[in-house]
Image: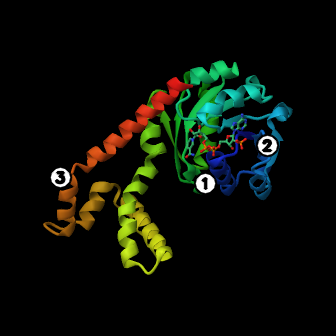
């Protein structure tokens, strides 16, 4: 299988490293770029690079479209890719498959929403299962699973909410974790030790959830009746922590819909 990446920024690089680390052959990956700015990256990873103006000289099963929404039109129409001969897999937030079909003049469009955790095999990637693309989609899923796990969505509209909750979600948790960072800095020796302790603290949460099969059983293990955890949780609930997150989800979903209308 040959895959191309149109654009070689944050998300493309994360996906490429994830694929390579899972054993995908470097010779099967090509970055399609309009300049050599990312030379260090493709040299280091021994992957090929083609200028967008020569992109029709190779054959690809999939080309991942990895540019910002504002650059989509230029990237699709400014490259010499024969879109009828490949499947365009867009990771771009907020640009509908209908719009992508018009721009590429092709029906072979799949939309996905990965995260940069693909770099270490932990992306929860959403894929919209369009009826016409079922065969190609089934071929793509094993590839996406090399970068983590895949969730199949039956409505394209759900991509807005998924992007808002999962795509952007780690950043919300990180924002909340700043409170812990501050406190751990007080208890740890220096900033380096703080980062290590914070990372251990966060990974212990993931392990609790995995081991105890969910959040509630994990909380039960930490909390004793009328203890400190009980009091802290009561204060969080009284201050409606759930609403804080719900408002972030809503704002991000609204923005995703706005982007769809802007471009
Ligand atoms: N970052 C994330 O966490 C994440 C997660 C999921 C989805 N996404 C989606 O991924 C897309 C890219 O995000 P990013 O964070 O990777 O952005 P980025 O780091 O800015 O990378 C975008 C890349 O697109 C290239 N590019 C722009 N116009 C081009 C053109 N006409 N032809 C070829 N390449 C072109 C740029 O290259 P030069 O300017 O150097 O030429 C740049 O390397 C966005 O649409 C976003 O919605 C991002």
Quadrant housing the C terminus: top right
Residue 21 lies, in percent from the top left, at: 67, 57
**SS state under label 3:** helix
Residue 35 circle label:
2
Residue 119 circle label:
1
Residue neighbourhood size for the residue with mark 3, other residues' Cα within 10 Å, grouped as few (<14), some (14–19), many (≥20): few
Quadrant assignment for ligand 1: top right
Lateral position of residue 186 relative to residue 132, left or right:
left
Give the farthest residue toward the bottom. 189
Residue nearest the observer in this picture, 157 or 37: 37
Residue designated by label 3: 238
Camera-near label (3 vs 1) is 3
Please say if the residues under marks 3 and 1 sit with CB atoms less than 8 Å apart.
no
Quadrant housing the N terminus: top right
Task: Say above or below: 177 vs 252.
Answer: below
Mark 3 or 2, nearer chain start: 2
Residue nearest the observer in this picture, 179 or 143: 179
Label 2 CB-ligand 1 distance < 8 A:
yes
Residue nearest the observer in this picture, 149 or 239: 239
Lateral position of residue 156 relative to residue 27, left or right:
left
**SS state under label 1:** helix
């Amino acid at each position: 299988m040959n895959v191309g990446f149109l654009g070689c920024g944050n998300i493309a690089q994360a996906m490429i490293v994830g694929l390579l680390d899972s054993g995908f052959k470097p010779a099967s990956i090509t970055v399609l770029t309009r300049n050599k700015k990312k030379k260090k990256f493709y040299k280091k990873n021994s992957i090929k690079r083609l200028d967008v103006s020569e992109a029709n000289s190779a054959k690809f099963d999939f080309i991942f479209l990895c540019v910002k929404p504002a650059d989509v039109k230029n990237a699709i129409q400014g490259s010499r890719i024969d879109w009828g001969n490949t499947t365009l897999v867009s990771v771009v937030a907020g640009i509908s498959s209908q719009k992508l079909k018009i721009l590429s003049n092709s029906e072979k469009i799949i939309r996905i929403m990965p995260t940069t955790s693909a770099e270490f095999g932990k992306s929860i990637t959403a894929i919209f299962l369009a009826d016409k693309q079922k065969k190609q989609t089934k071929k793509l899923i094993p590839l996406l699973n090399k970068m983590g796990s895949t969730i199949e969505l039956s409505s394209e509209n759900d991509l807005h909410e998924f992007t808002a909750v999962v795509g952007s979600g780690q950043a919300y948790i990180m924002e909340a974790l700043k409170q812990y960072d501050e406190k751990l800095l007080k208890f740890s020796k220096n900033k380096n030790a703080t980062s290590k302790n914070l990372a251990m603290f966060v990974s212990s949460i993931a392990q609790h959830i995995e081991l105890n099969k969910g959040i509630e059983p994990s909380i039960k293990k930490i909390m004793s009746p009328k203890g400190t955890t009980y009091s802290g949780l009561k204060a969080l609930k009284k201050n409606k922590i759930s609403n804080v997150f719900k408002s972030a989800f809503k704002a991000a979903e609204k923005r995703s819909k706005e982007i769809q209308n802007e471009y």
